[in-house]
Image (spheres, rainbow, N blue to C red):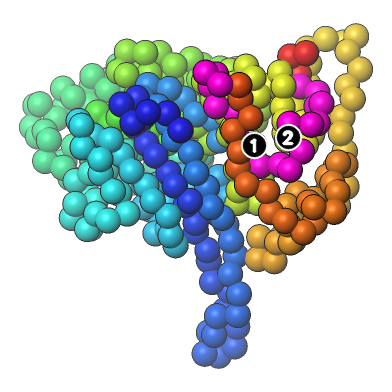
Amino acid sequence: MSDNGSVLLEVNNLKKHFPITAGFMKRVVGQVKAVDGVTFSVKRQETLGLIGESGCGKTTVGRSILRAIEPTSGEIFMYDDGRKVDVCALSKSELRAFRRHMQMIFQDPYSSLNPRMTVFDIVAEPLVVNRMARGSDLEDRVAELLRVVGLDPQFMRRYPHAFSGGQRQRIGVARALALNPKLIIGDEPVSALDVSVQAQVLNLLQELQEKMGLTYLFISHDLAVVEHISDRVAIMYVGQIVELADEETLFASPRHPYTEALLSAVPKPDPRYQAQKIVLQGEVADPANPPTGCYFHPRCNYAQDICRETCPDLIDIAPAGSEPHIVRCHFSEDLELVGIKN
């Protein structure tokens, strides 16, 4: 963890379990451990990439931080103007006011915008709800936000169907910026866009971060996108973070076998390069019935008896004085794994 003076968001042992019910009486017969003890921090004005395959719990982490869904347990702290705010302890009215500081950009720009509302109404809604502007001031603020994200304000009276996917996502970005938040959680904000449009939106997000001092938690399954935009990267597998390090270190020197396997699948723009993909055997562990010991051991090429019996702790393997390199693996200091910047 970083010192609290530089940290904006701190998440400690976050869990979100969804009940499994059966029978006419809806009796709880089990739990889906969507998020199972996630711990990380995000520094001010940095981008933390949260990456993993579909179903690993990364979106649930983002929504739990905003309390769009209620966490089962754990701690979520925001450092706001010298105050340490316990997000989980906020009442509904306090949370509504505090959400000005935390906003989300959603994955699908087609379904995240109300088709019955004009662009003006969509972007203005947070300002109206929080009573921050009205009348001509409201219209001026919406026009300014649209210009900031690269859209012409003269089209603010149009409906979302009149815009392309990239333009719709820019509208979503404008809506997220309306209340001048400190933290923006991007839930795969470019995955539904064409590659060329992805680059434009990513560059826009980086420009806005520099101009407005924004902090991003960037959720994605695309390693190339995360490598481009992130300062640090966290890898998730079956509800747990298995590795967290700065972008350069993680992509060059992974220390968890799952990270190595993910990196081996990243294509390189060199026709002479022969990819040495690591094909993982078996299926992703069931979060409703995870294996004993390390959740990754049934698919790991390096697994030994201790991996099947004991769940590894998150440990920092970085040399003293270096940026933390946190890994959940019994053999993280012994394995020599291959990255993509070697």
Residue at left 87%, top 29%?
A: 277
Q: Are marks 1 and 2 in contact (CB under 8 Å)?
A: yes
Residue 206: x percent and y percent?
Answer: 44, 16
Q: Residue furthest bottom?
A: 24
Residue at left 49%, top 47%?
A: 61
Residue 331: x percent and y percent?
Answer: 76, 38
- Residue 331 lies left or right of residue 142; in this view the side is right
Q: Nearer the viewer, residue 172 or 252?
A: 252
Region in magenta: 320-339
Mark sitting on residue 309: none
Q: Nearer the viewer, residue 266 or 141?
A: 266
Residue 76: x percent and y percent?
Answer: 37, 47
Check disc 2 and report its element: helix, strand or loop: loop
Q: Callout 2, which amino acid?
A: Ser
Residue 331 magenta-drawn?
yes
Asked whether the viewer can see residue 155, the reply is no
- Residue 288 lies left or right of residue 130; in this view the side is right
The residue labelled by disc 1 is 327
The residue labelled by disc 2 is 332
- Residue 294 lies left or right of residue 164; in this view the side is right
User: Neighbour class for label 2 at 10 Å: few (<14), some, many (≥20)?
Assistant: some
Q: Quadrant of the C terminus?
A: top right
Check disc 1 and report its element: helix, strand or loop: strand
